[in-house]
Structure formats: C-alpha cells, structure tokens
Image (cartoon, rainbow, N blue to C red):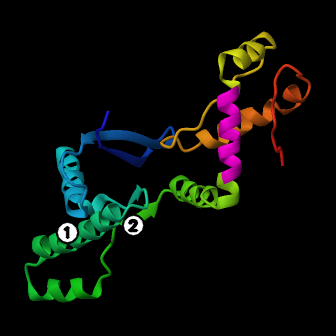
Amino acid sequence: MDKAILGINLQMIHASLAKTEIVVKTLGMIELGESHTGIYMKNKILEILDDYDISLDQIYSITSDNGRNMIKAVQVLNDATEESLYEEDIESENLLNELDSIELANIHLVRCAAHTLQLCVFDVNRTKEIADKISACRTLCKSLRTETYRRVLIENEKNIPSLDVATRWNSTYLMLKKLLDLKDFLATQSNICVEADWD
C-alpha cells in the first residue's frame, strides 16, 4: 500500500438550547496522485471545501504535521482569502479605504503537538548512545521471539515482546516497555540465556 492520503476534518461548535458541543466531521479522504507541493495541497483542500460550500473566511485554523508543503499550503490559502475579499467586496472607493484599515483574518496554522513531540523523540533516539541501547533491546526482543524462547514465555503466561516498526510512532516505546515488563521474569529463568544491560 504505497498511497498518500490527505484527510480533511471539520471541527465546529454546535450550539442549541439544550447543549453546546464540539463536533468533528470528516469531510474527505483524498488520494494524492501528484507531488505534494503546497499549491497542490491547497487545491485539494479547496476542492473539498467547495464540495461543502465552505468559504475560506469560515476557516479559523488548519492543524497539520510540520511539513513544508502544508506550511506553504496555508500561506497560499491566506493569500487566496485576502484576494477573494478584495475581489468580492470592492465596489466603491470608500469600501476600499475601509478594507485597508481592517486587519484581514488569516487562517492560522496549528502544528500537531503529537507530531512535534514525536520528532523530538526521533532526534533523541538517533543519538549514538540511545540508538545503541535500542538496537541491543531490539536484538534481545528478536531472540525472545524465536520458537524456543517463545514457548517458555507462553508457558509462563508472559507477553512476547513486540518489535518496533519505523512507521508506527509509539512502537519503540511499546517494545521497550514489554521488554522491561519481562526483566524480573528473565532474571529467574536459567533456561533463557539473556545478557542485557537494564540500565
């Protein structure tokens, strides 16, 4: 599955006499068939917004990863918002003068906190000391997943440690946690030959 998908969700406040709630709706999942440039992303966003008759001046913010293409897409959308305001509303010189004195509402780019945190974790994990320790843990997990050791773990109702996957953000954490959960058990097993630096 080598497809790129852009998901567009709408978050809004729905107020009624009974209650006020935040509502999240998925507007579209778009398969991206071209290079993911800022202009291309902007056009795909506009296509979905147009399907629902949503104008740019109704958008307060866009949350995305830290990709330069999304930063550029928001910049281009802001330029489009500014242009559309001038094109639609300029009917007299007085109105033009009024528009010059009004600060235009821009679409704010909100960078996803989870993605930013994960980038920080990746940076730390790439340092030699940490990378070496993670590599040693990965090797140990691979050993424990072999048929001989797997059987011992299952017989003792212990979880088999998982291996991390580059595309799953929390998989290294889960691998290390499962391995750490086995620390005491492994220390008591003479039939499992494990050399591990648990520090």
Callout 1: SS: helix
Q: Main secondary structure of the magenta part?
A: helix
Q: Which residue is mark 1?
A: 80
Q: Which residue is mark 2?
A: 108
Callout 2: SS: strand
Q: Nearer the viewer, residue 166 or 21?
A: 166
The reply to whether residue 54 is visible in this rendering is: no
Q: CA distance from mark 1 to mark 2?
A: 14 Å
Q: Position of residue 120 (x, y in %)?
A: 59, 60
Q: Residue furthest right?
A: 188
Q: Position of residue 42 (x, y in %)?
A: 23, 59
Counting residues from the start of the chain, the first of labels 1 and 2 encountered is 1
Residue that appears at 55% across and 52% down: 114
Residue that appears at 57% across and 56% down: 122
User: Which span of residues is magenta-colored?
Assistant: 132-143
Q: Nearer the viewer, residue 77 or 154?
A: 154
Residue that appears at 31% across and 65% down: 74
Q: Position of residue 192 (x, y in %)?
A: 82, 23
